[in-house]
Amino acid sequence: MVNIELAREQVFLDQCVGNENIQVMLEGDLIVPDTKPDMAILLQTDEKVIIDRTEAGADRINYLGRLNISVLYVAKSADKSVHSINLSRPLDDFINLDGVNKDMWVRAKAEISNIDFRLVNDRKVNYRAIVTISVVAERSDAHEMVVHINDVPENQLLKTNLNINRTIDNKIDRFTVKDQVPLPSNKPNMREILQVTSTIANQDVRISSGRVSISGQVLVTTLYRGDGEDSLIEFIETEIAFNEPIDVSGSKDDMFADVFLQVVDYHVVSRPDDDGEDRILDLEFAVGVEMKVYSTDTFSILEDAYIINQHLHLSKNSVRYPRVVCVNRNQAPIKEVVKIGNSMPDIFQVFRVKGHAHMDDVKVIDDKVVVEGAINTDILYLAENDSSPLASYRTVIPYKQTIEAKGARASMRVSVDISIDHAAFNLLSPNETEVRFQLTFNTQVIEEESTSIISNIEFTDIDPDFLSNQASMTVYIVQGSDSLWKIAKRYNTPIDELMAINDIDVPNRLSAGQKLLILKKGV
């Protein structure tokens, strides 16, 4: 045969180069500024670790970030006033990961696994934190493959479908959320903002042509000291809605997106209202976005072929690629009655409950992902004790959540992001509080698959002497693993003729032990 033309296509396959988890210990001190009074009691802390930038190097991933800590304390003064001190400790380190180079896409996430505080003296607080850093590196490899042989009967080409997830874009972006919030009429004017905590909740992602829209809320709790003489601490909770469009070249509405949001910076100040009183909260939050947009594509590729009286020499390459098996968003309510310890003063009024959820174990079983962990819970309250009017109680609330994940198997890779979308409480008695959290689990299950693709085919004529020495007629007994296509290829005969001679209407209905008559194809 001459002038045989191969049809080729190029496909890009994502490759996970590697991932690594390490734990680092961070230790240091917070010093009370000269402008603030001495500390008597550590009241409450808020801590967050942020990764600002990630870079790929030769066999390593560099990351830059910071550990932000805010400490509330009760002063050594007659009025037992509440004050705050803050620290932002820079992070600048790297993780070794073989095979990484500067052209790859890399991502780092950080989570505080544990943190302890110790009052060294009335001007110094020591902290010791264990931070888990998780990194992943990916690349996209181009592969050219043969998908068709032109002018060859279709039934002499054996094809299969290749289902892949193809990365459209990896995007790092940032947007700003702003609002001005007046204080409720029953709240005193602001003297000093003590602490601001924020989290992203109710995240939703919509993909359209050339754009990804991200909506949700920034949940903000602001603690402040009022200007009244009897005002120990006040708080105001705010929900700031956002809906941000981000341009993504090549995105379409049938695609998918993995989106990670975090508040990376904020600016909160008090401003005077029309009467000149400090009763307006001016809020501005910078939200960092890490996003991967990908499509699910199906390619019809050539698996095998034969041509009458021709030898085909197939060059094959083995390739590996990730396939997304399941993406799931699951919400779960967690409720616990917390009884404060005997050494703590009784509760008169709960100011707020905050929590940080972490995962201790993630297991994949058939069609399910089981997540176990705990919520580090902190209850800030007004005590029934004039000598210690403010108190904070810390406890750990365990949880276990089973997430439906169709197709998940133990050998697959799973990624789970957890967030607290809502926190509430109900005071039951002076020493019991019902605490409620709404957890959201964003789960992705990935299977690493492998296949062989045909990169080239060479053709040679079958030796005429070999063909002439074949039997003119053969009776073949079908084996259990046989198909009509394999038999036709083995005996150098067209499938249509094999079906006609043996009165076969449906080519896939062969049974073991069945006899087939095969006539030699002429040279």
Image (cartoon, helix red, strand yellow):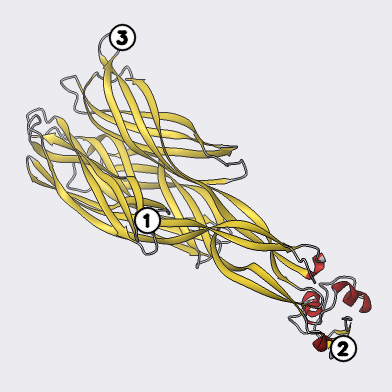
- Relative image position of residue 262 (x, y in whole percent): 38, 41
The kind of secondary structure element at disc 2 is strand
Mark found first going from the N terminus, 1 or 2: 1
- Relative image position of residue 123 (x, y in whole percent): 7, 40
Q: Quadrant of the N terminus?
A: bottom right
Marks 1 and 2: which is nearer the front? 2
Q: Is residue 339 visible?
A: no
Near mark 2 (Cα within 10 A), the count class, few <14, some 14-19 or many ≥20, is: some
Q: Where 141 sits versus 421, above or below? A: below
Q: What amino acid is found at the position of numbered circle 1 in the picture?
A: Val
Q: Where 7 sits versus 219, above or below? A: below
| Discs 2, 3 touching: Cβ within 8 Å | no
Q: Where 223 sits versus 251, above or below? A: above
Residue, disc 3: 274
The kind of secondary structure element at disc 1 is strand
Task: Work out how far the residue at label 2 is from the one at label 3, CA to CA, in angstroms.
Answer: 102 Å
Q: What amino acid is found at the position of numbered circle 3 in the picture?
A: Asp
| Discs 1, 3 touching: Cβ within 8 Å | no
Residue, disc 2: 474
- Relative image position of residue 371 (x, y in whole percent): 43, 57
Mark found first going from the N terminus, 1 or 3: 1
- Relative image position of residue 505 (x, y in whole percent): 90, 71
Mark found first going from the N terminus, 2 or 3: 3
Residue, disc 1: 135
Residue located at (88% from left, 77% from top)? 498
Relative to 321, 518 lies left or right = right
Res 154 quadrant in image: bottom right
